[in-house]
Image (spheres, rainbow, N blue to C red):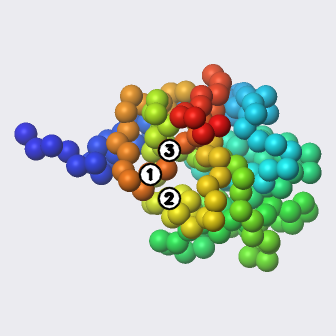
């Protein structure tokens, strides 16, 4: 029997995680997003001076808008990523008050092209799945890998997910940067000794 390649293994794991995430009800997803926001603000993952990059939620991803909206209400600096071009790093733009968002690629919204660019201290990451070592399984487009490689400093990488998205093991390649922490509706998990 032929051994599966890493790409084939990741594809199978994505399918498994998609099914688990899709099985969650809309009410559960809403309550989970609020619980994750509560865990985030009870943690020591950021300071008031930190610039936080989030994401515009796609499909049934864990919604990070409760975190981002609370940060904005407190006067915090919030970044939303924009897909500038295929195969390029994400364009990290400040989400300024009273500036309407625009279409930002893949069904997402982000600040307009005139918005200031910023480097995040904390990067909230969407994910398809994660494992006990902090390996993140994304969608396979490499946008976050390219973005992290292009930044002058590594931000704290915080995955946001539902507990059902945890898998036993995800293959990690050399370019895969592990998460510093993941927050699910059940609480905060930190990885390694980076925090």
Tell me, for residue 145, which label it has, or none: 2
Say whether residue 139 is left or right of residue 106: left
- How far apart marks 3 and 2 lie (CA) works out to 11 Å
Q: Quadrant of residue 170?
A: top left
Query: Does 70 sit above or below residue 112?
Result: above
Q: Which residue is mark 3?
A: 178
Q: Position of residue 159 (x, y in %)?
A: 59, 41
Find the residue positioned furthest to the top.
186
Asked which secondary structure carries label 1, the reply is loop
Of the two numbered discs 1 and 2 on the same chain, state the one appearing first in sequence. Answer: 2
Q: Which residue is mark 1?
A: 176
Which residue shows up at 59% across the image and 31% down it?
190
Q: Position of residue 191 (x, y in %)?
A: 55, 33
| Marks 3 and 1 close (CB-CB < 8 Å) | yes
Asked which secondary structure carries label 2, the reply is helix
Query: Does 140 sit above or below residue 16?
Result: below
Q: Badge 1: few (under 14), some or many (20 or more) residues near its Cα, within 10 Å?
A: some
Which residue shows up at 55% across the image and 42% down it?
179
- How far apart marks 3 and 1 lie (CA) works out to 6 Å
Which residue shows up at 61% across the image and 55% down it?
154
Out of 52 and 26, give the one closest to the viewer.
52
| Marks 1 and 2 close (CB-CB < 8 Å) | yes
């Amino acid at each position: 029997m032929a051994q599966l390649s890493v790409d084939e293994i990741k594809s199978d794991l994505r399918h498994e995680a998609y099914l688990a995430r899709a099985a969650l009800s809309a009410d559960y997803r809403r309550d989970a997003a609020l619980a994750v926001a509560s865990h985030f603000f009870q943690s020591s993952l950021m300071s008031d001076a930190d610039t936080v990059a989030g994401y515009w939620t796609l499909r049934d991803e864990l919604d990070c808008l409760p975190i981002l909206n609370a940060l904005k209400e407190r006067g915090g600096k919030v970044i939303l990523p924009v897909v500038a071009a295929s195969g390029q790093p994400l364009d990290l733009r400040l989400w300024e008050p009273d500036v309407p968002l625009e279409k930002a690629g893949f069904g997402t919204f982000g600040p307009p092209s005139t918005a200031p660019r910023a480097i995040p201290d904390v990067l909230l990451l969407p994910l398809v799945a994660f494992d006990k070592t902090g390996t993140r399984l994304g969608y396979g487009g490499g946008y976050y890998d390219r973005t992290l490689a292009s930044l002058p400093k590594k931000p704290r990488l915080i995955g946001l997910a539902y507990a059902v998205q945890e898998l036993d093991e995800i293959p990690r390649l050399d370019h895969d940067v592990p998460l510093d922490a993941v927050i699910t509706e059940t609480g905060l998990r930190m990885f390694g000794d980076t925090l």
